[in-house]
Amino acid sequence: MSNISDIIEEFLINTLGDDNYLDISRNDLANYFNVAPSQINYVLSTRFNYERGFMTESKRGGGGYITIMRTDTKNSTWLNGIIDRLNEDIDYRTACYIIGSAVERKVLTSSEAEIIKTALSPNALGNPFKLENHLRAQILQRILLKHNAKTKKKE
Amino acid sequence: MSNISDIIEEFLINTLGDDNYLDISRNDLANYFNVAPSQINYVLSTRFNYERGFMTESKRGGGGYITIMRTDTKNSTWLNGIIDRLNEDIDYRTACYIIGSAVERKVLTSSEAEIIKTALSPNALGNPFKLENHLRAQILQRILLKHNAKTKKKE
DNA sequence: TGCGTTTGACTTTCTTTGACCTTTATATTA
DNA sequence: TAATATAAAGGTCAAAGAAAGTCAAACGCA
């Protein structure tokens, strides 16, 4: 558990707080967490990307910096962007990021999000060359199982 | 008596205690019991499957883990029956019928049901011979589109 | 001998690191 | 002062590392 990327992500989210943007120094941050500077870029591109509702800008050279910004906070705009983006394929991790952001934006409830993540999980989709009916059964089975597990957890 | 799989099962059950889920590291566990890592998968698939009231999830890569969850469908004969039935393929109409019953029985809210129906619709699943990522994108796009349409109507 | 168990080789996914590149600011020099 | 060099950022990309997954062969006991 606890890979450093998740920790850095959490740190940045906390530092952001309710603000809409944040300036950081890549080197300082890398130094603070004792990682390669390019690890910061990894965190930014996987966690602070468009799908998750962020954008970044930067400047090189002396006194350089990176700015992390929340994108256009209007939900409908964001959603439309995401929907467009989905004309291309998407992996599970990114899908989860999108769904997570949708919950933060209150576009989805967390129980709806759980259902969707389940529907999209590698476990549910499995072998991509199965027939439609089979695939559907697999998905529904997975969803029902997980939903049950979830309600049990809440009790 | 006392093959290593049974011992690992017992260990996990004990560690679980009264909790409904448990995170473990496959490698650590395999190491602790001096077995091949894949033995853990064997234990999970034979002992912590849905017939026994469990399901699992996992993440690979640095900081990866396996989550074992209780599903405990035992107290719902109805749900259990459905889940068993889903070992066979199922067409869209039947799926909708099942989901409808689940709503009646208050296993699902109607908004959850809508999402699931969307995920399972012929439109979302489409051509069954596409690659997993493509299929997933299709499903999520459909879900988001529909969710969007619904909220728009409500506003 | 057959079925459940155990092992290991190979695969996939996600993270971390490092070597090399580009841009910008500042200091130096003709 | 204009041109040039140097240092100080940040960017990119591919390889290595760190998990977990799959599958089939070998094993072993009732």
Image: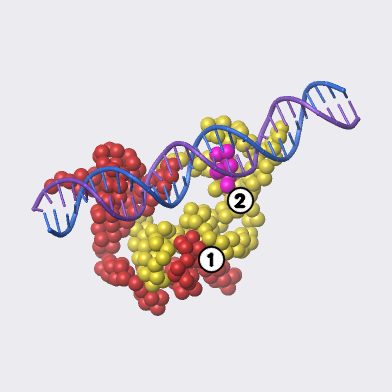
Chain colours: A yellow, B red, C blue, D purple
> Magenta: predominant secondary structure element?
helix
Which amino acid lies under the numbered mark 2 shown in the image of this protein? Phe
In the depicted structure, whether residue A109 falls above or below residue D13: below
Q: Residue at x 33, y 44 (%)?
A: B26
**Magenta-colored stretch includes residue A84:** no
Q: Residue at x 20, y 44 (%)?
A: B4
* Residue denoted by label 1: B141
Picture coordinates of residue A32, whole percent (x, y): 55, 32
State which region is magenta. A38-45
Q: Chain of mark 2?
A: A
Quadrant (top left, top right, bottom left, bottom right) of the C terminus of chain B: bottom right
Which mark lies nearer to you, 1 or 2? Answer: 1
Picture coordinates of residue D16, whole percent (x, y): 47, 36
Q: Nearer the viewer, residue A115 or C27?
A: C27
Callouts 1 and 2 in the same chain = no
Picture coordinates of residue A83, whole percent (x, y): 58, 64
Q: Indicate the quadrant where residue B99 lies.
A: bottom left
* Residue denoted by label 2: A54
Q: Is residue B29 left or right of residue B133?
A: left
